[in-house]
């Protein structure tokens, strides 16, 4: 399948400041690493996303909320009234130069990705995945909810059933809420149980349109494979989507400071590839991830897998230099795996399948008509 990498100059800047978890190089690092390995360039030129217009943003977000973000950025701070009403200008959702354009470009890239996907081109939008944003307020570092716009664009283009799958370590609450009453959309979130935003229990179904799989801390690759094969793919096949949108995330990987999950990037890649095979239109979005080494390797490697490019066992000097130049106050030096500087593909983290994991799969299977658990090769 043809694939395109979507980016924009605004994403090459950290944007967030100080000790905010997003004040690390993310998309720019992915691009530099992929370029150093020859994975983007003349053969796979990236596309530049435009910012969404105010009118486009108002398709989902409240106009007064859109204006409040612009007003706060212009002033360099949010008024107390705007902070209280829209949850902007807080430690969680700070105001910084370029905020509005950055958030609007996340949406513009998601719409571009949906249009490409509709034409049969798999689109990877690493600057997307702001899945916590609500119609009239910011939440969880997310101001505008670009996955919502990717789904809306696919529906506008005539797609009959859109499946949204979220592998971020945090529950995809904003997307789930946005489509609670839309039977053409199913949302499926695999996230760490008991983790912020403390929603997404297994029993939360949103009238049947949502499925949630809250997994235990320390989730390993063997357990994740079982969940994908025994719950995610059967539910997806039962829904029979003609378009799939995935927020892949990178915070479910071992070593991320904002989750306690322990997945390898290789098992995450295989899950995304399996979902991409289910429908003729696929959009892949970035999402969370607060360890710059594991994020850059995961997303660059996913791009290589999606485009059929070889991943070396050991990185060449130019690629190592990209990773060696990173730093992150949230990851102590003695917790930095040396393999993060020399490889792309993680070693698999296999382990026992715990009782709570099996119980979760059984509960999901019992709650709906999908009972199959087809064999799934993790590659």
Image (cartoon, helix red, strand yellow):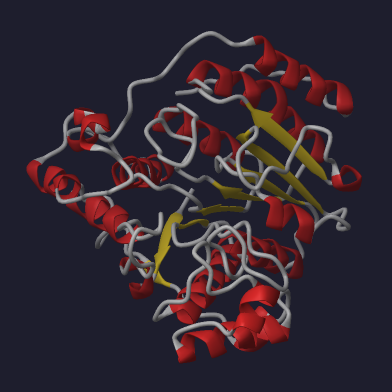
Q: Is residue 332 above or below residue 26?
A: above
Query: Residue at horizontal 40%, vertical 33%?
Result: 265
> Which residue of the protein is positioned furthest toward the right in this rendering?
207
Query: Residue at horizontal 83%, vertical 26%?
Result: 370
Q: Which of 145 and 31 is in front in this view?
A: 145
Q: Is residue 93 left or right of residue 28?
A: right
Q: Nearer the viewer, residue 19 or 271?
A: 19
Screen quadrant of the C terminus? top left
Give the total of numbered labels: 0
Residue 371 location (% of width, % of height): 82, 20
- The image quadrant that residue 110 belongs to is bottom right
Q: Which of 263 and 19 is in front in this view?
A: 19
Q: Nearer the viewer, residue 91 or 261?
A: 91
Q: Is residue 110 left or right of residue 262?
A: right
Q: Is residue 242 above or below residue 227?
A: below
Residue 179 location (% of width, % of height): 80, 58
Residue 53 location (% of width, % of height): 58, 86
Q: In this view, does 292 lie above or below 195?
A: below
- The image quadrant that residue 54 belongs to is bottom right
Residue 272 seen in the figure: yes
Q: In this view, does 243 lie to the left or right of 315?
A: right
Residue 337 location (% of width, % of height): 24, 29
């Amino acid at each position: 399948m043809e694939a395109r990498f979507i980016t924009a100059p605004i994403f090459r800047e950290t944007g967030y400041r100080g000790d905010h978890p997003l004040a690390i190089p993310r998309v720019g690092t992915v691009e530099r690493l992929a370029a150093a390995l020859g994975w983007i360039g003349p053969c796979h030129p990236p596309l530049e996303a435009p910012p969404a217009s105010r009118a486009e943003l108002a398709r989902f977000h409240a106009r007064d909320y859109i204006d409040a973000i612009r007003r706060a950025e212009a002033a360099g701070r949010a008024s107390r009234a705007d902070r209280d009403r829209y949850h902007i200008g807080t430690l969680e959702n700070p105001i910084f130069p370029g905020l509005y354009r950055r958030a609007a470009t996340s949406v513009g890239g998601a719409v571009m990705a949906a249009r490409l996907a509709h034409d049969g081109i798999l689109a990877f939008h690493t600057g997307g995945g702001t899945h916590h944003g609500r119609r009239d307020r910011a939440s969880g570092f997310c101001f505008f909810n670009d996955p919502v716009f990717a789904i809306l664009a696919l529906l506008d283009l005539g797609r009959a059933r859109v499946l949204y799958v979220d592998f971020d370590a945090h529950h995809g609450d904003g997307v789930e809420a946005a489509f609670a009453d839309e039977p053409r959309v199913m949302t499926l979130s695999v996230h760490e149980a008991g983790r912020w935003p403390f929603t997404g229990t297994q029993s939360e179904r949103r009238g049947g349109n949502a499925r949630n799989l809250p997994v235990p801390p320390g989730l390993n690759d063997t357990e994740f494979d079982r969940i994908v094969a025994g719950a995610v793919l059967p539910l997806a096949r039962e829904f029979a989507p003609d378009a799939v949108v995935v927020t892949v995330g990178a915070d479910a990987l071992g070593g991320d400071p904002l989750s306690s999950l322990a997945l390898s990037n290789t098992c995450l890649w295989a899950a995304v590839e399996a979902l991409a095979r289910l429908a003729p239109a696929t959009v892949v979005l970035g999402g969370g991830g607060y360890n710059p080494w594991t994020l850059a390797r995961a997303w660059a490697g996913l791009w290589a897998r999606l485009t059929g490019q070889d991943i070396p066992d050991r990185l060449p000097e130019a690629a190592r230099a990209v990773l060696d130049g990173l730093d992150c106050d949230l990851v102590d030096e003695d917790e930095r795996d040396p393999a993060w500087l020399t490889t792309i593909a993680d070693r698999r983290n296999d382990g026992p399948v715990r009782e709570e994991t099996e119980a979760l799969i059984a509960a999901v299977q019992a709650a709906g008509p999908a009972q199959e658990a087809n064999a799934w090769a993790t590659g």
